[in-house]
Structures are given as structure tokens and as C-alpha cells.
Amino acid sequence: MARWLPRSTDLTRFCQKLNRVKTLEDDMMETSFNRCLSTIDLTLLGIGGMVGSGLYVLTGTVAKEIAGPAVIVSFIIAGFASLLAALCYAEFGARVPKTGSAYMFTYVSVGEIWAFLIGWNVLLEYMIGGAAVARAWSGYLDSIFNHKIKNFTETHVGAWHVPFLAHYPDFLAAAILLVATAFISFGAKVSSWLNHVFSAISMGVILFILVMGFVLAQPKNWSTQEGGFAPYGLSGIMAGTATCFYAFVGFDVIAASSEEARNPQRAVPRAIAFSLGLATGAYILVSVVLTLMVPWHTLDPDSALADAFYRRGYAWAGFLVAAGSICAMNTVLLSNLFSLPRIVYAMAEDGLFFQVFSQVHPRTQVPVVGIVVFGLLMALLALVFDLEALVQFLSIGTLLAYTFVAASIIVLRFQQQKENVPAPAASGGQPNPEPHEGPSGGELKEYESFSDKLQLVDRDKSKEQREPGQLKAAFEPYLEFLSDFYPGEVVTVAVVTLMVSAICLCSILVFGNTHLHLPTWSYSLLLILFSLGFLLSLLLIWAHEQQHSTQTFQIPLVPLSPALSIILNIYLMLKLSYMTWLRFAVWLLLGLLVYFCYGIWHSKENLREPRPQRVSARYVVFPGGSLEERVQAVQPSSQPATGLPDTDSDDCKR
């Protein structure tokens, strides 16, 4: 029976296949897309993805049912939490200006299977999100006409009473998706222009709401007679934060569009910062005027802004609010239809998804096959399926992508930078090494020996310039046992430990008192243990050298900023319902089936022919003895000290 068991070498090779990373091209700006988007274009795309119907619906719902006027604080905290994730996307978008967003960022730093699963989840997220917004758009327009569209459809087509299906076919939602698909297929410039029009109208309506709202504001609506500013206390503010966090999930459209940006190194970080700042400001200011216009406990959750103007005697303003809401939903639709085909294109281009989706139209320079196919699938979802039960599924895919992008930032920041090997001299000979100072000068000395370069290091370790991923010189006396690992290896293990500690810590916080019913002493003990594990992992990462580059944007306070984003995202994921996790598990199993049946075999990294590498030995000799004594100490006894080293000897390698 043992002969049927896989050998350890086979398992090692299989794990290496799963965790191989993407090899990037030398010219990162070369692309089959049309680099035509400016910083303003990307900024408006990000605003369109974030400022949707949530501005008109979410603010009133959270204010009345969860936080009261303190929804303002909830949006401030949620905006800061989103900023942590957005900065990670900004750094990656500037360093890797390729389409694919979270999928691409994970592929170049963590590994192939993790990147595929991220892309697989984001794919479903965009499909359900686009279909859900189309149904909300249809329902909002239908409500303006007193539900005449719904009544006509149920009378002439019929109503359905089948689980997971809608009560009636929503032809209007399907039609708006098909029209949007047609516009998106005309190219990035047309899509950007259309987004500009809808965003301008939406921002004009928001500006009108703010001006009129402050004119009609009554500070007494925050007084204690109306319940005070924070009637639900701190718990209400934090619960509102968890809900408001999902209002900012649209900024990843900017990262997905980085391959079509003219200058992605500058445009992507700026567009993310500008769009997130403007969206956060809009949500906060609209919440202020809404809760000052009318008492928070009298708000209508379904149409808070329109109802507030109606009650203050400005019924005509409701039509402007309705126009702004429809335009805002149009921008979200465009954002979903713009991002989804490009992520599918990136997966197909890498061989992990079906190759037909990697085709780019030669004239419009967009992945037209992916746009048409997934536009039709969105329209089908909006036409026949009941999406209310699946809307919460959107959150888990987004939060998982945020978590992996934050972890990827840490891993990539502590990896060694890949440098191009200089070409040999024109004469064909080896380039002459530059003169170095002797041992008294403390500089590096090189010797041509053993058929390769033998380097003698004679410098103070505390002053040595170390590579990214190596232990800092200041910590070497205390953590000397970590010096034997490859650069970046300890950091990778520490990132995994950090994520495991974060999962355990958040699990205790979420389920410790409710589902697990832990006694107080064990609850406190587990919190302390997992918190220590999280902090120690963070300190261990910080004790290593990281890349410092001024060429592109870098998120500050690494590894602290990504670590805070990781623990926040995990906490919010664990707050989701168990049915969401069950559907997520089923979708993951389907994704693994696609990967192992197709992706792993057609991956370009799998098809890439391995380059033969010449095995060489490198000796590093420190002062304190002669060259002959040091070399003889590591040479096999069967060879003279001046002979070719035995490359199979572990001692010789060291």
C-alpha cells in the first residue's frame, strides 16, 4: 500500500506549484489596452463606485436603526478603516500597473492558488453586485411611477413563487444592464465619458442637498429632548461602522483600471486618495444635514432624504434627489461592468481561466468577450433571481480580498528587489572589479578564485547595508538564530502566524461570550495569549529590513498599517451570518474544481520552461585568519585548496 502513497518530493513539488508567484515583464507599461485614463478619470471612476445608492438609503437606515446622529462618527471610523485597505491598493497599483486588482497583487507576492481564489470570489462579487444594483435601480424608478411597471409585469407575465427566484421577472433591470454592457464595450474612453456625465449630475445633486440641508438645519434635533447625539452609545456607533464600511468598497475599480492609466505610478495613488476623501466627506456631510433637518427617530429608512425635504415643505426637491439617486446607481453599474471583465481578462491572460476571455478587441482595446458574456450573465441574474439573500455574500469576498492585499504588502515589502544582471563587456571578457580598500578601510574585497568571485567581507556588521528581508543589525545579538534563514523566509512565517493569531483573537471577541459561553477567566486568558501572538509576530516582522523606494508610492507605517487592516477585515468577516459562510464555502469548492481541472495545467507559470541554472559556490571569509586557513576549513579533504569546490557539499555552500 505504501507504493501508492505520494513521495515527499512529489508533495513538495505540488506545493511549489500551488504557491508559485507570477513573473512580471521587464516593461511594466507595455500593454494591449489603451492607456488613455487620466487622474481625473480614475478619480471619478472611484467616486462612482463608492457614492451610489448608499448615500441616499444607507445614511437614513443607519441613523434611525443603529447609531442615531452619531452615524457621522461611524462614517469617520469606517472611512479611516477603508483608508488602510485603500493605501495597500494604492501601493500595489503604482508598483504593479497591471489590470487584475487584488488578484494580480496576490499573484505577484503570495501565490497562484490564493490569487485564483481571490479572483474567483471577486468575480462573483461583481456579478451579484451589478445585478443587485440593477434591481435597486429598477425598483426605485418603479416606485416613482407608483409600481405600475411591477403591476403590469405580474398581470401580463405572471408572478413566481419559487425559492431563490424573484417574485416576477425584472425586464427593466435586465435592460439597463444590457445597455450599460453595450456602452462599456465601446472602449475605456467612452465608459469614462459616460461615467463623467452621471458623476457630474450626482455630485451636483449632492451639492444641492448640502446647501439646502444646512439652510434648513435645526441644531435642536441633536438635543437631549430628541434622544441626544449618540442615543445607542458606543455599541451603536461601532455597529454602524460595520455597516458603513461597505459604502467604501468601490475604490478597487481604480486599481483594476491601472493598466489603462497614462501614468499609473502617480495617477493610481492620487485617484484613490482623492476619491476616498471626497466619498468620505460626502457621506459625513449628508449625514450631518439629514439628522439636522428632521429628528433622527422620524426618518424614513427607504427614502430618508426625499422624505426629509417633503416634511420641511420642499416636495419638489424629492425629484432632484430621485434623479441623483438614479445617476449614482448608474455609476455603480458602470463601475462593476468596467472592473469585472478586466479581472477575468487578467486571469485568462495568466492561463488560470478560459483563454477566450483574454482576447482584446483590436479597435476598442477592451476585453469585449468578457464584457459581453458577463454582462449577459448579470442581466440573467437580475432578470430571474432573488438577490436579497445573496447581497450579504458581497461583503465576504471584498473583505477577503482586502485581507490578502494587506498581507501581500507585507510579504512584498520584505522581499529582495529583483535587479537586472548587467550585460558583459563588449570584448567578451569579465568586467574588471572596481578597486576596493583594504581591510583597514573596512570595505569589501573581491578575489577571482575557484572559477567565480570570492568575496572577503571586512566591515563592521552593525554598519553593513543589509538586503530587504534580512534581520536588522541591531537585533542580531538577540535573535542570532534567525540569521541562518533566507531573506524574507522568517517574515513569511511571521505573516502567517499574524493572520492565524488575528483569526483566533477575533473569534474570541465575536463568539467568546455568545456562542462559546466562555467563563471570564478563560475569555481573558485567550484574549491575552492571542494578542501577544499577534504583537510578537508584528515585532518579528518589524525586526527585519524592508524595501525603501522613492520611485513609487509606499504605504507608511509598514507592517503596522497592513496588520491593522488585516485584523479589522477578519473581525468584520466573522460578524457575517453562517449562511453567508456556507455559500462562500460552496463557491470556493467550485473554484477549486475549476482551478485543479483547468487553471493549474494551463497556467503560464506552469508552461514556462525552467531555465538551467549553473551551480556555483560563493565563499564569504571574515577577518581573523589567512585565506588559506579559511578555505581549507571548508574544502573537502579530497581536493586541494585551489581546486574547484564540490558544489554538493553543504559545508562548501556555506
Image (cartoon, rainbow, N blue to C red):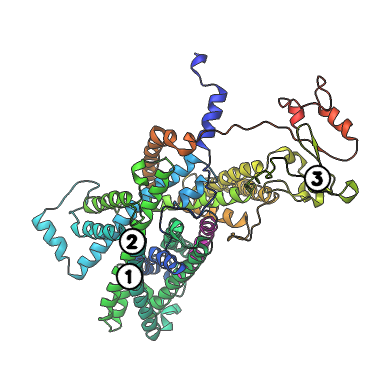
Q: Secondary structure at mark 1?
A: helix
Q: Which residues are magenta?
A: 69-94
Task: Give the mark toward the camera: 3 or 1.
Answer: 1
Q: Residue at x 17, y 65 (%)?
A: 147
Q: Is residue 619 above or below residue 126?
A: above
Q: Residue 85 in magenta?
A: yes
- Judging from the image, what secondary structure is the residue with disc 3 in? loop
Marker disc for residue 198: 1
Q: Can see residue 214?
A: yes
User: Would you name the residue on which mark 2 appears?
Assistant: 334
The amino acid at mark 1 is: Phe
How crowded is the residue under tag 3: few (<14 C-alpha within 10 Å), some, or many (20+)? few
Q: Position of residue 256 (x, y in %)?
A: 43, 56
First along the sequence among labels 3 and 1: 1
Q: Position of residue 120 (x, y in %)?
A: 40, 45
Per the model, the C-alpha gap separating discs 3 and 1 is: 61 Å
